Image: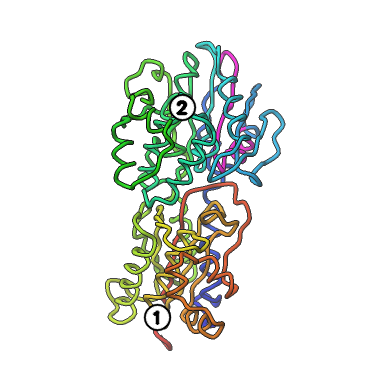
Amino acid sequence: MTSTASGSTPRALLRAMFDAAIAAAQPALCLPPHLPPRPAGRTIVIGAGKASAAMARALEDHWDGPLEGLVVTRYGYAVPCERIEIVEAAHPVPDAAGLRATERIAERVRGLGPDDLVIALISGGGSSLLVAPGEGLTLADKQAVNAALLRSGATISEMNVVRRHLSAIKGGRLAAACHPARLVTLLISDVPGDAPIDIASGPTVPDPSHCADALALVARYRIALPPAARALLESGRGESVKPGDPRLARAQTRIITAPQVALEAAAQVARGAGYTPYILGDSLEGESRELGRAMAGIARQVVVHGQPFATPCVLLSGGETTVTMRGQGRGGRNVEFLLALGVALDGLPRVHALAGDTDGVDGAEEIAGALLAPDTLQRAWAAGLRPRERLDDNDGHGFFQALGDSVVTGPTLTNVNDFRAVLIEGPAGA
């Protein structure tokens, strides 16, 4: 394998950029500057998400007064805390542990007074972890809806519109339950555009959408809803807490880190290795394979014509793409992007790439993503793998794992969404 301008291989540089992106979004680094002042009354900590336990630990380490609370995180993402209870539950499809934890969180904020402070620690994954079925719904109904949404091809923002109107805690309802206490929500964004309402389906912020919007999305994506869920939406009883609600008058929201922060950290690593970084966007959406094909077209133009960027360079992007499951493979939006990129490049020299989820989990796999090199397709054919067939079967994880090119980080304790880096070397001898 060739070496980069700094002497390391493209593969090593790509992994160094990914690691830097994850490190830049660690709660221990980004949470302390956003802590509110101590209240005259009690301090209650609540939260949900893949980063919530690490956020709780960072809060404990930097809080100079008494506090108590409970947060729920994904299985395997717990971090030891002394005063804040950490509960683990299932993601991306909710389970009974998440339901029980959510009930206990709601109980924690009942009966608070105006001198009390609630600090809500919210990050990606909270939509599944913070589960409280709406009126007439069961946990089984919520599980069925979540599974259907994940298969539908809807964007994360669209999925969350439906989730908010089938919940007893999302869409500002948790914030309303904290009234009249002061509420400060600290958010780690994992959504395109960093809209607070879309992070964990917005349990502590007002929701401008309506049941009718959720029904329109259900129709657009032909999502099969349990009868009780459809009835709740059609009746209008699933309406969420709207902007201007007086119960949210003392609620504040602060985004403490976001995808752009991670991309800028990766860009700094690229510069140090002699590559010019270009951040193409921190909120790219759409079908994973279509974005892969589009990125391949850009990379080919760079290699063949030196446009629109001179080499050596790295094309960085973030956001959350979509996989519409049509095959029987193991899915994963980052590996689907990468496999589509590889198929479209067809072994084009000088182009390497890494795509991974900063939370360490791409789709339902305990694999963050994968690496692509100019010889990936050649090695695949030699191993008896058919790249196009694997792509058609939505089996990016199976493809890259068979080649030994999976990227496994373990729990990263943060989540600022997907990370994509396309590294393009300069011409030989340049």
Q: Residues within 10 Å of mark 1 (few under 14, many from 20)?
A: some
**Disc 2 from disc 1: Cα separation:** 49 Å
**Position of 272 relative to 81 (above/below):** below
Disc marking residue 134: 2
> Which quarter of the picture shows residue 50?
top right
Quarter placement of the C terminus: bottom left
Mark 2 or 1, closer to the camera? 2
Determine the residue positioned at 54% across, 76% down. 9
**Position of 279 relative to 249 (above/below):** below
Disc marking residue 346: 1
Asked if the stretch drawn in magenta spans residue 40, the answer is yes
Where's residue 114, x and y in %? Answer: 50, 11
Determine the residue positioned at 50% across, 83% down. 381
> How many labels sit on residues?
2
Look at the numbered disc 1 and give the secondary structure of its residue: loop
Which amino acid lies under the numbered mark 1 shown in the image of this protein?
Asp
Which amino acid lies under the numbered mark 2 shown in the image of this protein?
Gly
Look at the numbered disc 2 and give the secondary structure of its residue: loop
Q: Residue pushed farthest bottom?
A: 429
Asked if the stretch drawn in magenta spans residue 299, the answer is no
Q: Which region shows up in magenta? A: 39-59
**Position of 152 relative to 179 (above/below):** below
Where's residue 411, x and y in %? Answer: 62, 51
Q: Earlier in the sequence, mark 2 or mark 1?
A: 2
> Which quarter of the picture shows residue 274?
bottom left
Where's residue 208, x and y in %? Answer: 31, 30
Where's residue 150, x and y in %? Answer: 45, 49
Disc marking residue 354: none
Q: Residue pushed farthest front?
A: 227
**Closer to the camera, 262 or 329?**
329
> On the rendered structure, is 389 left or right of 83?
left
Determine the residue positioned at 40% across, 55% down. 322
